[in-house]
Image (cartoon, grey):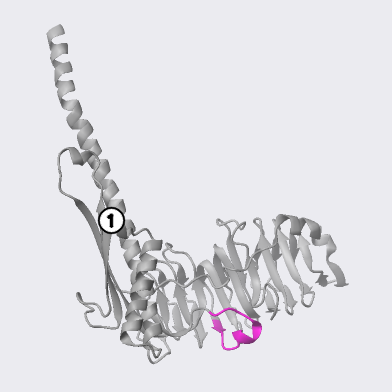
Amino acid sequence: MNDVKGGSAVVFAISLPVVIGAIAMTVEVGHWRQSKARLQNAADMAAIAGARQLIVGLNSNKTVEEYQFNIYMAAFGDAYENGFDRSAGTIVVNSPPKSGEYTGQDGVEIIVRQKKERAFSGAIFKDDVYVSARAVALAMEGITEACVLSLSETAGPALSVSGSAALTLNGCSIRSNSSAANSIEAGGSSNITADCGYTVGGASTGSNFTPTDPECTGIKTRVSPLTDPYGHVEAPSAAELAAMGCKDQKDLVNVHKWERHMPAGRYCGDVRWKDLLTLEDGGTYYFDGADLTLSSGFAEMTGRNVTLVFLNGGTFSNANSGHLDLTAPTTGDYAGIVFYGDRHTSDPTQTVRVAGNATSSIEGAVYFPVNALEYRGGSTGSSGCTQVIGNTVDFGGNASLTNTDCGKFGAESLGGSSSGVTLFE
């Protein structure tokens, strides 16, 4: 019996280095795969940066040599910013691309190769290990201004129209930053009518999407993401909020038994109203951990040059499609914004429900960058400027939006340009 135990110990001692070596090699190969993924991201970002610089060069009076140099520097700079180490690798920048499906087209091809140090495998193998990546981005003409934007980079769907809803956009497009295969989705008997559609990922709309721009033949996929247009706007600090004091429902001013005037300021307690609620002209409203709810389909909320800011978990609901008649301020910190959800303190698990009846009007941006935003209830948004921006956006009722007059409200541009960049390979 002791002999058997001794034999097992010998076998274990002999096999242990093999087992440890196999585990070590698995870990090392996994590390190389992670390095390749990071290198691919660097190549993608470099291709996009180079293609953007190509557009600048094509529309300038620079010589070919000058803008080729600028393309290289832009591409190399973005590759470096995203982890490429030239001291341990090489980068090739071709404009136009010299290989693949898009050879010779207006675009930029990036090929990067980086040496990786061996660890455990160095005891067995002596040859060098390299990881490589390739990307191609093309200059694309005719990106039209959006008025609906989903900011999520991964959700599927990130922008959706469901049931029998009809989304009609006048003079603007839909856009999604998600890389999901169903980044934009229209199901059932729903329909989207817009200038065009753009997504980082893919689209699942079938015949439910109708483009109105003659240059648009359908949802354009693999388009570079759009930077958050209101990412520079910040809510007040905790100290600034504390200095405002607190209001709640009891601070509403009685006008008639069915109408209340709502003073501007910071609300720390919930406000729930079923009739007419009139906001202070030019007022900014901070709902600090508090909810604003229109609880009836007969409710109305009106206000001129106003912004409603929701932070620390505060949110808005108009699920019963009460009437909304709101315009954004044209100047100041919240220029162009009617509804603002704080990206730092909003609860990402909350769903914000903005809806209205057939005559509702929101002139300005509805902006909830970390929340699921449901735009519901048959609102037609008859204003000349409505922007709907959420982490994800879902339309469940008929809506007709336009952004033809957004400039006069001080609203930010949602990606309109005469040319843009699409990542193809």
Can residue 312 be seen by looking at this rendering? yes
Which quadrant would residue 235 be assigned to in this image?
Answer: bottom right
Quadrant showing the N terminus? top left
Can residue 421 be seen by looking at this rendering? no
> Where 132 sits versus 210, above or below?
above
What is the magenta range? 400-413
Which quadrant would residue 230 be assigned to in this image?
Answer: bottom right
Is 317 on the left or on the right of 66, as rendered? right
The reply to whether the magenta stretch includes residue 410 is: yes
The reply to whether the magenta stretch includes residue 250 is: no
Determine the secondary structure under disc 1: helix
Which quadrant would residue 422 be assigned to in this image?
Answer: bottom left
Q: Residue furthest top?
A: 2
Is 171 on the left or on the right of 292, as rendered? left
Residue 375 percent across, percent down from the top left:
56, 72
Residue to which mark 1 is pinned: 88
- Is the residue marked by circle 1 packed among few (<14), some (14-19), or many (20+) residues within 10 Å? few
Is 282 on the left or on the right of 131, as rendered? right
Which residue is at a point 21% across and 77% down the rendered structure image? 98
Residue 136 percent across, percent down from the top left:
29, 73
Is 175 on the left or on the right of 5, as rendered? right
For badge 1, the amino acid type reads Ala
Quadrant showing the C terminus? bottom left
Please name whichever residue, 94 or 87, is drawn nearer the observer in this view of the structure.
Answer: 87
